[in-house]
Each structure stands twice: as structure tokens, then as C-alpha cells.
Amino acid sequence: MIIKKYLAKDMNEALNKIRQELGKEAVIVSQRKIKPPGMFGIFSKKVVEVTAAVDKIKRNDSYKYEKQDVSESVEALKRLIGSQRFQEKSNIDVKEKEDKPESDIQNNIIKEMSEMKQMLSNLTAASNNKVREQSRVEKVLLENDVRDSIVQEIVSEIDGMKDERDEFEKAREVLSNFIQVNTPKIAGPVVLVGPTGVGKTTTIAKLAGKLALIEKKKVGLITIDTYRIGAVEQLKTYAEIMNIPFKVVMTIKEMESAVEDMKGCDVILIDTTGRSSKNVMQISELRAYIEKINSNNIHLVISCTTKAKDIADIVKGYGILNYENVIITKMDETSTYGSILNIVSSAKKPISFITTGQSVPDDIKTLSSTELTKLILGEDSIC
């Protein structure tokens, strides 16, 4: 057995060193943060000290790892520690050693013995833990960028099903129950909120086209997105093409007036300024506008290409706006759809619409939980 210590600036660097030298079969025995050795160590940042172990046989000057159980080597080390010769070294009588070098030797041996015992304990625990092989469903979900904690939750539910169905059939049932879909009544003031770049303005135009041109409803458009260059002109052009009223709002007072002027419309679609979910002041300013609108039909817009960590931040930051539904955009710009689960899990709100391209008004639709499940499991695609 090889037992080696590694010093690294962080755990990732240590793991890379261990894999390169000892291979994937190596077991992490212990880890701790220490000051670097040497005179200048006391002035440096702490580093990670990782102890790793692996079984090996030496052949042609290279290490080849044995298949034998780690526990055998553990027992060998225990016998070594238990031997009389080793005990004699560790049981130094302090009273008989008066000079300081002898005392330092004793302290070092005691420290090493303590560390060795801890290593043995960790090795024993590692040898008793059998690595669970990933199921086919688990691999597919992870490959499709579903957050690991969600994958484990789904796998746990599947494992709890004791019937003889195929695991993918069970997964379809679990995911269909996990994903909520809602087709809200689009009437009165409808507000779209979300960060910059997720496609709110284009989504507003698609909704306007669907309602005005296909469903023949009287639609009005309002925008408060005066910060982004070209946003106002883009929406104004759509409004002129569809022959529907359009207003630009600069202040909260103007918002009240604009909504009042459009009270004869069946639907008033309101485009908002993209804000960073981390900027509390900007989100609070947006909240003041929405409160004047007095709408219960607020949709958070998130792109399907958004990373899992960013999804959690967006959902948390926009939570004070009390949105009731989620619109997932840019489904055509990715080949993996695991972010759907990441969004639903973080927001805990139903999906109202998805968008699948740039075409107005065609590329906006509502998919069932079954259809979304097929996308997530890689059984279907948008394009």
C-alpha cells in the first residue's frame, strides 16, 4: 500500500495531484489546512494537506493497482502498530528523558501515532463504503445539466417504486409530477419581469401577436424598458405592424395614466427593464411600478441557457415581485433541457409558456409536463 501526503493551494489541485500519481483508485484518508513548511510559512496563507492511500504492486518501474480489498491492507497496518517493537518506540518514558531533543522526539512520535490511528479509521470507513453505480436515468439527467441535488431526489423517488416497470417509465411519472404547467387566463395587465438578455421584449411581441392576430383580442402594449438601446423602437415597430396601441412610460405617475388610457383593452402587456437580481435597489424600484399596475398576472422570464447557480440567484432576487408563473425562453438555443427542472425546483412556480425561436408570433407555446419530461430525458428535442 502507498500512503502519501500532498500539499496544495486547494482541494481541486490536491485531487489532481493524487489522480496523476496514484490513479483513480486512491482513497482520501485525511485532509486539513496547515501553514506551509519552512521559515516563511508563517507569513503565507494556509494550504491543504491531503493524505491519500492506494494498493499497488510494482512492475516495470510503474505502479499497477491491485483489486484486493482495502481492508486487508488496513489490517496489516493495524498489526504493525500493535507489534512490540512499535509499542516500545511509542512508550517513551518522559521522566527518564531530561533533555529537550529527547522530549521533542517523543512528542513527534505521539503525534504521528495519533495521525496513523485516524488514517486507519478513515481507511476502514472507506473500505466499508461501496460506491453505488449510477443508474441509466441518473446518468441521463446529469448529462442534461440537472442539478445534482435534484437528480438524487428523483432517483430516490424512483428507487421507492417497488413495481416492475422500466426505470425510464418510472422517471417519466416522477418528472411529470415534479413539473407544474399552468395556462393562465391572459387578461387585464400582464407583466413580464426578468434579467437582461432573456428575451422579454421578443416574448412580449410574441404574446401580443398570438392574442391580437390569432385570438382576435384587443391588446395594448406598455414599456418601461427605456434603458436598453433600441428596446422601445423594437416594440413600437411590432405595435405598428399589429395595429395596437403602444405607450412608453418614464415615471410611476405615467404608468398609472397609461394603464387608465388602455382600460378598454382586453389585455395590457407590460415590458419591464432588465435588472440584475443582485441589485436590491433596482428590483425595489421595479416593484414600485408593478404595485401601481395592480396586477396578479406576473411572469418571471428565464432563459433555458442559464446556469443552475444563476437560476437560483435570479429566482431569489425577483421573489419580492410575487410572480405567479415562469416563462422559459431560448429553448432553441440549447440541446440539453435539464435547466427546466432547475428552474421549476428553484422557483416552485408553474411554467406558463416556453419560446422556441425568433418568429413572431409562432414561437411561443405551452407544453404539457409529459412533453417537457421527454425533452429533459433526451427523448425529444425542440429542433
Image (cartoon, rainbow, N blue to C red):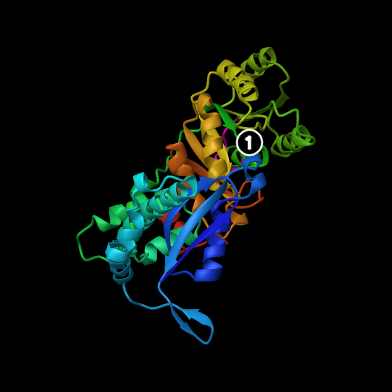
The residue to which callout 1 is attached is: 195
Q: Could you say which is closer to the camera, residue 284 or residue 362?
A: 284
Q: Residues within 10 Å of mark 1 (few under 14, many from 20)?
A: many
Residue 133, by quadrant, is: bottom left
Asked if residue 104 is positioned above or below residue 281 in the image, the reply reads below
Asked if residue 234 is positioned above or below residue 71 in the image, the reply reads above
Q: Amino acid at mark 1?
A: Pro
Task: Residue lying at the far bottom in this picture: please name it.
Answer: 60
Which segment is the magenta one? 213-218
Q: Could you say which is closer to the camera, residue 37 or residue 186?
A: 37
Question: In screen coordinates, is 378 left or right of 75?
Answer: right
Q: Quadrant of the C terminus?
A: bottom right
Residue 359 % position (x, y): 66, 50
Residue 223, by quadrant, is: top right
- Determine if the magenta segment contains residue 216: yes
Question: In screen coordinates, is 265 left or right of 174?
Answer: right
Judged by its main secondary structure, the magenta piece is loop
Q: Quadrant of the N terminus?
A: bottom left
Residue 151 % position (x, y): 40, 53
Residue 158 % position (x, y): 29, 57
Q: Image point 66% across, 15% down: which residue?
A: 252
Asked if residue 210 is positioned above or below residue 126 in the image, the reply reads above
Whether residue 312 can be seen here: yes
Whether residue 147 can be seen here: no
